[in-house]
Image (cartoon, rainbow, N blue to C red):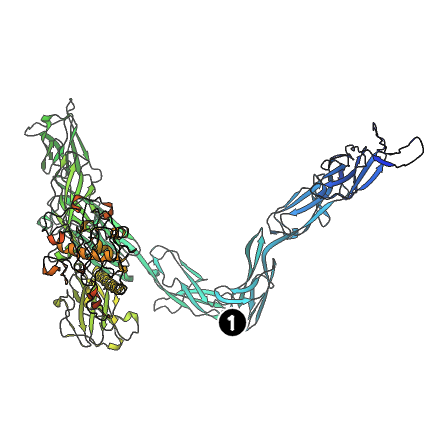
Amino acid sequence: QATLKLAVVAVEGGVGDEKVVGSGKDLHSQSFTVTVLTAPSAPSVSPGLNPTATEDKPFQLSCSSSGGSPDPTVRWYREGVHEPLESVRTLTDQGVTSILTLSPTKEDDGAVFRCTVWNRAMSANTKLEAMVHLNVNYIPRVQIGPENPLRVERDGTAVLQCNVDAKPQVSNVRWTRNNRFIAIAFSHTLHRVALQDAGKYTCTADNGLGKTGEADILLDVQYGPQVTIDSGPGQREAEEGETVTIKCNVSANPPPLTVEWTREGRPDFRQTGQTLKLHRVAADSAGTYTCRALNILTVGGKTANKIGNASVTLLVRHKPGRAQITPDRPVATEGSGVTLTCSSSPPGWPVPQYRWWRDQDDSAQTTTVLATGPKYNIPSAHLASEGKYHCQATNDMGHGEEATVVLTVHQPPRFLAKLQPHVTKRIGDSEFSAMCGAQGKPKPSIKWFKDGQEVSLEKFDISTDESEGRNSVYTVQSTLRFSGRNRPGGNQLMPADRGVYSCVFENEVKRAETTMHLRIEHEPIVVNTPHKVAYDLRETAEVMCRVQAYPRPEFQWNFGNNAAHLTTGADGHYEINTTINQSGGDIYTSILSIANIQAHDYGDYNCRVTNMIGKVRTTIRLQPKGPPEKPESLTPVAIGHSFVTLRYTPGFDGGVHDTKYFVSYRRTADSGDDECVNARRSGAPDSWHEVDCQRNNPCNVTSLDQHQRYIFKMKAYNNKGHSNYSDEASAVTKVDRIPAPQRVAYDPETHSLTLNIAATCLRMVGIIEVLTNHIHEEDWSPLEEHLALAPSGASPTRHEATISSLHRTAGPGGRSLDPDSMFQDDTVLPVIKEETVRVRVKLCLENNIQACGNYVEAEIGPPYIKEASTLSTPTLVAIIVSCVVFVLFIGLMFVYCRCRKVQTKKGSGKDYEMETTTVHPSIVQQPPPPYYPSSGMENKALDMDPSKTAVYAGQNGYGYHGANQNGGEWVNMGYMENSYSNSNNGGSQDSLWQMKMAAANNNANSGSNPEHHHHHIPNHYAGYDPLTHGGYGAVDDYAPYPHLVSSASPDYSRNASRQDYTPDKCRRREHHLESPYHDVSGLPDPYHLMLENEENHPKKPHQEVSLSLDESLESGYSTPNSRSRRIIREIIV
């Protein structure tokens, strides 16, 4: 064995051959190849890490690595691709080289290539890498928009967009059309595009790579239809009977959807197609024909309908037809002009000539032509211009029929006599009058006005004289006399007669007016002067005196009884100002101002006014401010169905200007309608309500009921107090809506008409109408007689009347029928055929037959609702609900009885074991039951029975309190948990025990305590009482269940009180019931008679119960076992 150790200091080539050589004879030889692992150098990439290539030109990437042993593996990868790329690997003295050859495209621009180097000297997860980012120059890519083809409406703007993607980028492009250069901008705009601009446009881009990019766009210029007529626009002549053909040419982009011919004035005429063809034309065929074309433009994603048309007038040679003059009833005003126009239909072709003439006097033998042409103008009409005017059309084909109109000339009112502008009279003058006259056509009307208001005939008398002249011209004269029943002496002038009087004539043409200003000389008259003013101390008071007088008066003031006149002084305490009303000229106002009022300034101030006719004196009192005085003259001025408007005269406001007024009102009943009104009232019907009127006059009171009488009164309030109430005023509100009958029925056999009317307080009458033969709805005929209806009050009523074929009588029907309100007997009426009759009724107010409700047509046939129809809706609802409740009660009773019958059959003998327990009086635990034999009946049907809670609610031997019982749900719980029997159902024998004790307690406690609620039901079987009647007298084995009594809170939530466990001291003690010996054995079967009373159960003989004690009791509550009566003693601790 030989071992060779090599110490490699340097490696050259990485592989060597070694031999083991001995010194002697060669015994064994073996050669080994040794490879020295060395890591290669980092890869070297050419032409660099960021080379640039050109699209579609071959490009090589070279990756080299040297120094590795063994030779490394060199591979190319593209980012995003897991598989290596195909490359050419070469070995040289310098190392290993991998060459990747590419044909670059635009998508290769920006691509990342990775060269990896690895050999065995490196770990599996270690590689040497070099990253190359390739840049590719690519030829231009051209896109044209915004859409292709580009649709533009004619005369619109077209924008051609050229988008270029190139590397390197281009700075401009070249637009050409039909090989002709247009522009170099990326966006080329065409303004007001014309049809010749349509076509193909080319955009070319060049970035110097030797190849250009280009794209074409098609410009589509759209326009609406352009329509032309072959025969040329304008007119086309034809002879009568000829066939006319007219063609229209349509140019449009896109092509038209429809082309049709229409005729002006004839909407029903329509021909489809470009050619119009008319056969055998006549004068009526003449007119204007239009060729109409429609297409739809789609520009920018929006559509628009475009219509083009062209018209041609077809002229058919014919003579004119009948002439027509407009206006057909001409009216002219004297002095103004009028124009008459003549036309003919058919108009005639060639164009006709028109001539005008008018009727002359009978003596004239020739006709004078007034004018030629379609129009005749009268520049200034006068009364002589009236008459008949004629017009006729004529052309080469003949004469047309003439037309005639009558011209009427109206004359506006023209005064023949006017009023004197200014007139002055003295008070008391008599026999004064004013006269005016005018003439006009048509006849003018005459009215007299005073200060803009029509004069009253109570103070004036108007007489008018009329006469008709030539050409129907009227002359009207009117006289206004100052006389009337409201004048002193019947015809004397009064101061109120002063003013402006107008005499007005008016007809259809114009209004004419003449005026007179009348002044009346009279002594001063006090007008609108308050008799009181109020101011507080140290205020400035103004005392006003206003009079009406003519001529001008003089004012004098004095205080109280002091005759000295008050004048404006230097101290400024008094100041007097006098003014005149400019509008009327005869109202004078004098104001006395008193500065810094003192207590001695309060009192009466006298105003004396004098003129040359007379004098007057008035007194105004100055007083401190105080409460207002009551309003006067409270009067309703407007009444509606829910409001009343009141007008009043305010009293003195006490010197406080912010005085407010309040209206109090209440509803009252008319005599005879008390029951009706009381039935409709709610709340406090006679209480007063108040409305704040502020200072409104009139004042509106709203929210009232219709057809009710109200009483109103008013008082005033200010910060000093309030006034008394004014006198009362009353008003009855109107009716808002008149009801219609609820139901109307008519029986043709008995001729009876039945009306059901809802509750109402209105006095109404029924209007009956009939319709025979069912021909026309408008042929309803009313009957002369009306059906009088009394107010129904608070409940509906039913009314009946008999309608026979020849006679109609009325008879009462319903509880509120008034016999006197029906038709009288033997009223003759028209004959009505019963089989075709229809009847309808409406209700109207008795005092206003025009105010009515809606019609209700009668149901034909006997009325199926008689007296019941008079019941009110609440009553009917109550009756229906009661019936439903009664039916449900009967059903529940039936189900209950059936359940009891089934439960009774399930009884069987069973032994019971009494458990020993400590008994405490509570609402949960029950007293221990007595001994029961093993053959006793167990009634499991009582478990969880809803009725069992009521039965057991009174157990514990102390009775039950109705006020604390909540339906007895607690009893089942307590009985289930505290049963004294071994049965798992809570003790069916316990149930029997408790039924007996509940009956005993009910009988014992009945009527003894007012808080106990018991029903007194006679017992058919007495319970056992050892002191009376052989032991049976207190407990009723078959006593009915006690009734459930509601309580505010459940019993189990109430703490037990002392009274719950102690006997009532006030009631009579029943010693035999309160003894510990509550029951005995050997009782009859408690369900024996119940089985006998079951409807389908056969009767059984009385069942004797044998008693035995087969089980040992766990308590000492039972007596020794025997067949005789056993007593169980209850010990309560």
- Residue farthest toward the right in the current orientation of the protein: 25
* Residue 1018 rendering spot, x and y as whole percentages: 13, 61
Does residue 901 appear to the left or right of 367 in the view shown? left
Residue 946 occupies which quadrant of the picture?
bottom left
Amino acid carrying label 1: it is Ala
* Residue 628 rendering spot, x and y as whole percentages: 13, 37
In the depicted structure, whether residue 805 falls above or below residue 629: below
Image quadrant containing the N terminus = top right
Does residue 361 appear to the left or right of 1039 in the view shown? right
Does residue 253 appear to the left or right of 1040 in the view shown? right
- Residue farthest toward the top in the current orientation of the protein: 571
In the depicted structure, whether residue 71 falls above or below residue 987: above
The secondary structure type at the circle numbered 1 is: loop
* Residue 1008 rendering spot, x and y as whole percentages: 11, 52
- Residue density around tag 1, few if under 14, some if 14–19, many if 20 or more, within 10 Å: some
Q: Is residue 374 visible?
A: yes
